[in-house]
Image: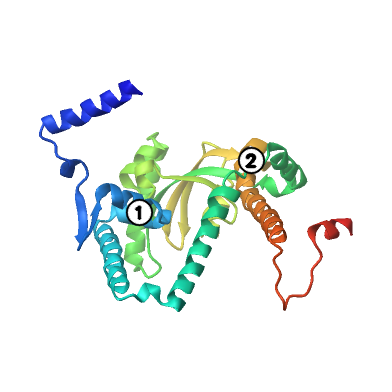
Amino acid sequence: MIARVVMVTATVAALFASGVRAEDVNPVVGKAGDTIIREADLERLLSYQAPALQKQVREQPEQRSLFIRQLLSARVVADRARKEGFDRKPEIREQLGYVIDNYLAEQYLDKVVVAGVTVPEEELKKFYKENEKDFLLPETFKVRHIFVESAKDATPEQKEKAKAKVEGLLQRLKKGEDFAKVAEEASEDAATAPKGGDLGYLSAGKTNSEEFEKVAFALKPGEISGVVETPFGYHIIKVDERQEKRTASFDEAKEYIRTKLQGEFERKRLQDFMEKVTKEAGLQVADEKPTASKEQKEEK
């Protein structure tokens, strides 16, 4: 412990000896009246927010400025309200009590009651066994293509020019040029050309062209099609790999199942907890009709 204190003290001393000020280490990012927000304060306050907002504030300077302004503006108005005694009004104090209670309850349930909930491995296996038919994977094909655009409203001359181009590319392939290299150089599909025309794994009904699917899924691995016309233009298609229809293994499905069951287990933990604490507190609502307790339900 003594060694740690000495080390920290030495580090701080070294910082100041080298001309580094506290202001440089933890700079002020905003202030209003007596309220000062430093970088460390901002990070702490930001950590309480939703992940989406945290991402925006950290990545977008204008959102960062807006967040700081909102924090300070709220403090300025709240300070004014306190000076005028607004926070001492009975109805305001009562509403503040509700706000505090709700926030405390929400945070406690989230960070204490369900924080440690996990789905046991045996439950994952049980779900997989009972729903194995739902993990059937369709036949898939790893497909590449070379694309030359020809819009629906293209003139006959434009269509002819596009077709001539794709036929020229097909001849290059027939002479032995590498499909991926030709696709990267000449395909007009901006998304897949840099990847050698790679469309990834496709299954029936997952593309927007019946003409494309009919040809692609008839090819054997390694085969290259002729020129295929679709409403979007002309394609040359190659199938790299084919995977037969099969059932996903437990290991493949495990994380999906875990995600699916996690919410159910958390809701169960919350329900059990709420039933326990409200029963212990003798919670009653005059207008509510009596309902069977959990134990009574199980007896039935």
Q: How many marks?
A: 2
Q: Which residue is mark 2?
A: 254
Cα separation between marks 2 and 1: 36 Å
Tell me the quadrant of the picture where the N terminus can be found: top left
Q: Amino acid at mark 2?
A: Lys
Residue at x-position 77% and y-position 75%: 289
Q: Residue 188 in the image: state x and y as whole percent.
A: 34, 52
Viewer-side label of 2, 1? 1
Q: Amino acid at mark 1?
A: Leu
Residue at the extreme right? 300
Position of residue 230 relative to residue 129, above or below, is below
Q: Residue 239 in the image: state x and y as whole percent.
A: 52, 41
Q: Which residue is mark 1?
A: 45
Under circle 1, the secondary element is helix
Q: Along the line of sight, which residue is nearer the eye, 195 or 102? A: 102
Residue at the extreme top? 3
Mark 2 Cα shell of 10 Å, populated few (<14), some (14-19), many (≥20): some
Under circle 2, the secondary element is helix
Q: Residue 112 in the image: state x and y as whole percent.
A: 56, 48
Q: Earlier in the sequence, mark 2 or mark 1?
A: 1
Residue at x-position 52% and y-position 39%: 223
Q: Are marks 2 and 1 in contact (CB under 8 Å)?
A: no
